[in-house]
Image (spheres, rainbow, N blue to C red):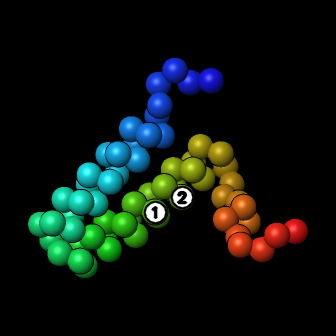
Amino acid sequence: MNKFPVWSVLGTIVGVLLGFAGAFGGFWAFLLVLVLGAVGFLLGHFAEVGEVNLSRFSARQR
């Protein structure tokens, strides 16, 4: 188990960045940062793991 809460800190940083984008750039800047952040997350995950499996985010139960 990690002693440092990496995902909590990362989530906080992303939330602050999205807040700044929304406050100073408006709704479209917020949306652009959100979409580019999701794309960056998927690319980083692909670079680390080597594959992107989105089936676990599906609402269907098997």
Q: Residue at x 54, y 58 (%)?
A: 42
Within-10-Å neighbours for mark 1: few <14, some 14–19, many 20+: few
Disc 2 residue crowd, few under 14, some 14–19, many 20+, Cα 10 Å? some
Q: Secondary structure at mark 1?
A: helix
Q: Position of residue 37 (x, y in %)?
A: 39, 60
Q: Residue furthest right?
A: 62
In this rendered view, identify the residue nearer to me: 46 or 28.
28
* Residue placed under numbered mark 1 in the picture: 38
Label count reads 2
Residue shown at 44% from the left, 57% from the top: 40
**What amino acid type should be assigned to the residue bearing mark 2?**
Leu
Q: In the picture, which quadrant includes the N terminus?
A: top right
In the picture, the disc for residue 42 is 2
**Percent coordinates x, y for residue 19 in the rendering:** 24, 60
Q: Is residue 49 left or right of residue 33?
A: right
**Disc 1 marks which amino acid?**
Ala
| Image height of 16 relative to 27, above or below | above
Q: Quadrant of residue 20?
A: bottom left
On screen, residue 58 versus residue 15, left or right, reads right
Residue extending furthest toward the top: 3
- Disc marking residue 9: none
Label 2 sits on a secondary structure element that is helix
The C terminus sits in image quarter: bottom right
Vertical order, 51 against 21 (above or below): above
* Residue shown at 51% from the left, 50% from the top: 44
Of all residues shown, which one is farthest toward the left? 24
- The answer to which of 32 and 6 lies nearer the viewer is 6
**Label 1 with label 2: CB-CB less than 8 Å:** yes
Mark pair 1, 2: CA separation: 6 Å
Q: In the image, residue 7 lies at what x, y percent? A: 48, 40
> Toward which corner of the image does residue 23 lie, by quadrant?
bottom left
